[in-house]
Amino acid sequence: MWWVRFFALRLVRLVLTLLVASFIIFCALELAPGSPLAALSGGRTLSPEAVAALTARYNLDDPFIVRYVTWLGGVFQGDLGVSIGKRQDVSEIILGRALTSVTLVLMASIIIIVIGITLGIASGLRDRSSNLVTLAATAVMAAIPAFVGATLLLMVFSATLGWFPALGTGDGSFTDLVWHLILPAVALSIASIAVVARVTRAAIREELGTEHVQTAVSRGIPYPAIVRRHVVRNAGISIVTVSGLTIASLIAVAAVVETAFATNGLGSYLVQAAASKDIAMVQGISLVFVTVFVLMNVAIDVIAALLDPRTRAAGAVA
Amino acid sequence: MATDDTLLDVRGLTKVFGDRTAVDQVTFELPRGRSLAIVGESGSGKSTLAKMIVGLEAPTSGTIWACGADRSAPATGSRERRVRGRQVQIVFQDPYSSLDRRQTGAQALDEVLRLHHDYGADYRRTRIAELARLVGLDDRQMSVRPKALSGGQRQRIAIARALAAEPRIIILDESVAALDVSIQAQVLNVLMDIRDATGVAYVLISHDLAVVRQISDDIVVMQDGRIVERGTTEQVLDDPQEAYTQLLRASVPEPGWTPSRRQKRSTT
Amino acid sequence: MTTTMPAPAEAAPAVEPMARSSRSWLRRLGPLGIACAVILGIAVVLAIIGPYLPGLDPESTDLPNAWVGPFQLPGSPLGFDAQGRDLLSRLIFGARTAIVGPLIVLIIAMSLGVTIGMIAAWRRGWLDSFLNFGLDILFGFPGILLAIVAAAVFGGGLWAAAIALSVAYLPFIARVVRNAAAKEGAMEYVAALRVQGVSAWRISVRHILPNISPIIVAQGTILFGYALVDLVAISFLGLGVQPPAADWGVMVNENLIGVLQGYPLPALAAGLVIVTVVVAVNVLGERLLDISEGRR
Ligand SMILES: Nc1ncnc2c1ncn2[C@@H]1O[C@H](COP(=O)(O)OP(=O)(O)O)[C@@H](O)[C@H]1O
Ligand SMILES: [Mg+2]
């Protein structure tokens, strides 16, 4: 069975990738100038008890590899270390803030998929004149960094029109959270909408030009049916791939948007932790981000492979 | 073993790709002063055989001797490859990828001349002019990029480039197959003139029996990686023993050189 | 039989001019491409000479001037920022880090990426697989994330961010070069040169690399745009170029509060400059890519 082999290979690569990635993140602590103890404390002077506690917690007296294995074992049990700045478990902090970031990225994903793909299909099926407009618009949108988008949105929708709240995450209820995350989600999606729209448009164009679509047209099959049955389905692989990759990349960009809107999600906290050299915190959040990112990439690969009839025909994908 | 009169001696040559045997126990000799044709339909293993002889593919098993030296395994260093390059050269099929598109014909020849010989700049220029004359190209054609040349002109530069190494053997792997028939005739004439002028021996790979008849003395016929028939050109073409050879022959309208439009080939 | 040949029957195109004229390049870029090149050119010129222009002062703060608008004080056509510094001066001075930062990324990522890509294209087999696996892992680190981690470990600054981004972009360049070089290496002239005995090194450097250079230049331009966006973002986060240096990302950060207080111009102006340069770089990069792939 081709897919057994396919999934097995993919799984092996996934595990290897995560292992090496975790090792690189672990090394951050070792690479930091000065002793690991100094890195963990973020340069603060510690009481002897605190030093002893940290040394014990991170097994700082053990050799490097042993420390990595111990650390990784801890990670598997949900122990990501302790944040010096917050005097709190890293995993606790992450859990406390994850909801905001997950909601933000999900909202942005929905915006990107709905608007990006719709725009792309519409302009792909249209004639040239409207394409020029789409091309120009997407070229500009693709060049708007998330924090510049945030500036524009704040100016128009908060400062001028007063429709949306400017900063923060509201009173703690989920509806208020969503309400506060609308502008951040839009800021996060602007450039991605353009990317998805462009690729979708190009995929549709290419598909429209292929022989079997031309044949279908010449056979007199109704145009909408052709579009539904052939064009969108076959263009689907590249659309899924690019949407997926774009959305996966939002995980990191969210840090920028969260900072711009003073949203207390994981990303903005990662930035604060980096600024204050709270290495354990940075390691914990990076590990979560990289894991999610890698998992999403694998998911995209698998979905694209499932969509592609050639994959099944070939019988094996490495 | 190879005698002094044997330029090329191939024994039991086999190449396996995965579960496919592209070349299967091929044995033949190329005596001095004769030209050999290897014919067979697309996919019969001709190019793979050629690539093993010039060291672009490693044989799975078997031996290759050329000009008295063992070259069964591809050369390891550039020096050894240069030595071998002065024995056997190859001209490929596709005129559009046979030249570096950034080099003029003269530059391409100059690069090869510098590689193989210790000529001064003046003498290299003279040699380039000689080689150009040999393949029938003028100064102007030698000093433009390939983009400005026709397919036949490009193949002539590729032939001149092979000649620049002053090899004893040139393998022509479908080298004229992609050309129009009239151009093909011109290039074939050039090839025969070169043989008269330099004494080089050809291994002509083709599925076009008309071309084969014009150039080669002996023929081996390949099918599915094996040699199924061999003999002199007249024997094999005029009185084929194997059904496969008869079939090949039947696909050529008339014996002898017939300038007619041929169908598109898909050999690589 | 004679050695002189009749004139070839097929029509050969007219002789190509020896050097590809720069005019044909301009024509293929088109008016839009040229406009983009000019915008990028202006940014580069300002990055070089900006700090030597007379009358500019990006750093002295004058708090009473904070948020003063355009043309209200002599010598300040764009007005002042949150700390009363001259906005135009800061925008012009900001061109330097905006250009130099991506340039560092480009030089590091390109030199490593091209080397790795070329090696991978030549040496199939385990080395290729190994490089592919290594690149796969790097794919797992989004550029901004890697830069944030680098800032945490080594401290903020342009260099740490630029080196981190170089590492993050390495896989893209290496893949593009690998694929282009593999395609070029499959050409019959490369096999012919191998048979001649030309060394792999010489074939790579003298034949394959020049032939794929248009693709490399185009990808480099596109990479420049990405690097610019990521670097200003990192500076915006406070982890890249450090205040009070004039950097477009830093400027948006410093003046964001003005957007909510009714003084949007300083933040907006910096943002607009970023978008303009990035659009120019992206469009130029796509043009070059189209040209290199023969679509124009
Ligand atoms: N690098 C390769 N890997 C796998 N199979 C190959 C390779 N090169 C050639 N083959 C296979 O070997 C067979 C012979 O090919 P080739 O020597 O090119 O035939 P010919 O030149 O006679 O058309 C074909 O079936 C081809 O698919
Ligand atoms: Mg062949």
Image (tube, coloured by chain):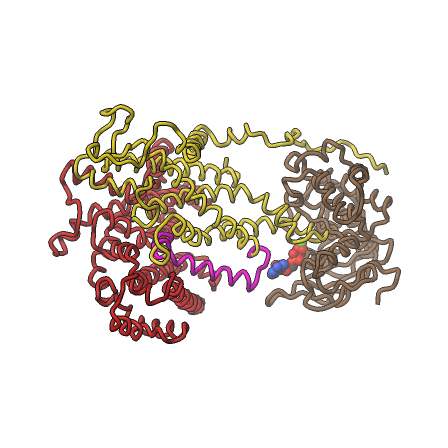
Chain colours: A red, B brown, C yellow
- Of C58 and C105, nearer the camera is C58
Residue beneath the point at 20% across and 62% down: A96
Spot occupied by residue C14 in the image (x, y as percentages of width and height) = 65, 29
Spot occupied by residue C46 in the image (x, y as percentages of width and height) = 41, 32
**Residue B258 seen from this side:** yes
Task: Based on the picture, tell me whether residue C144 belongs to the magenta stretch.
Answer: yes
- Of A198 and C203, nearer the camera is C203
User: Which corner quadrant of the image does residue C127 belong to?
Assistant: bottom right
Q: Residue furthest right?
A: B4
Magenta highlight range: C120-149
- Of C93 and B69, nearer the camera is C93
Quadrant field for ligand 2: bottom right
Task: Based on the picture, tell me whether residue C57 belongs to the magenta stretch.
Answer: no
Image quarter where the N terminus of chain C lies is top right
Q: Would residue C86 be found to the left or right of residue C159 on screen?
A: left
Is C21 drawn above or below residue A306 in the view shown?
above
Is C208 drawn above or below residue C135 in the view shown?
above
Q: Magenta: predominant secondary structure element?
A: helix
Q: Would residue C222 be found to the left or right of residue B184 on screen?
A: left
